[in-house]
Image (cartoon, rainbow, N blue to C red):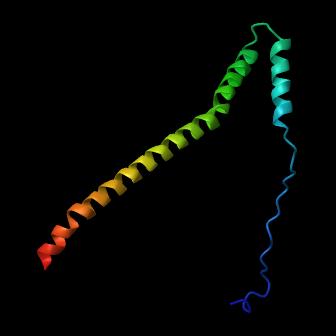
Amino acid sequence: MGILNFGKRIKNRKFDYVPRHYDQEREELEDRLKRYKIRDGDPQLIKERIKGSFRKKYRTKDEYSSRSQKRSNRILLVTLVVLLILSYIFLTEYLPRIIASFQ
């Protein structure tokens, strides 16, 4: 198949992406300073304040997810232990009866 395509060559894709440095701490600091400098009833400023309060709530998302993951792991561990205990009881009590009934 490659021999039949004499004139058509596949060209590589080119991307004009210029990486930029993003400093999250610096941007947060600038936002906080901007909020404290201007205190009038500017609707744009009110929107920025609301956005900032939502961002603060999402920062605790990691904390919430780690707590929920620990809780999930505990539930899994307890379930596993209960199943192991029930399996042991079943094997010690009922397995000899089952084997005896087949013999």
Q: Residue furthest bottom?
A: 3
| Front in this rendered view, residue 98 or 59 | 98
Residue nearer the viewer, 61 or 30 = 61
Residue 37 in percent (x, y) is at 86, 13
Q: How many marks?
A: 0
Residue 83 is situated, as x and y percent measured from the top left of the image, at: 35, 54
Image coords of residue 47 (percent x, y): 70, 19
68 vs 101, nearest the viewer: 101
Which corner quadrant of the image does residue 14 belong to?
bottom right
Please state which of residues 6 and 76 is positioned toward the viewer in this rendering: 76
Percent position (x, y) of residue 100? 14, 74
At 53% from the left and 39% from the top, the residue drawn is 68
| For residue 68, above or below residue 78 | above
Left or right: 34 as drawn, with respect to 102: right
Judged left or right of residue 60, residue 40 is right
Q: Is residue 89 above or below residue 101?
A: above
In the drawing, does residue 38 fall left or right of residue 99? Answer: right
Quadrant containing the C terminus is bottom left
**What residue is drawn where x is 85% and y is 38%?**
23
Image quarter where the N terminus lies is bottom right
- Residue at image position (26%, 63%) is 92
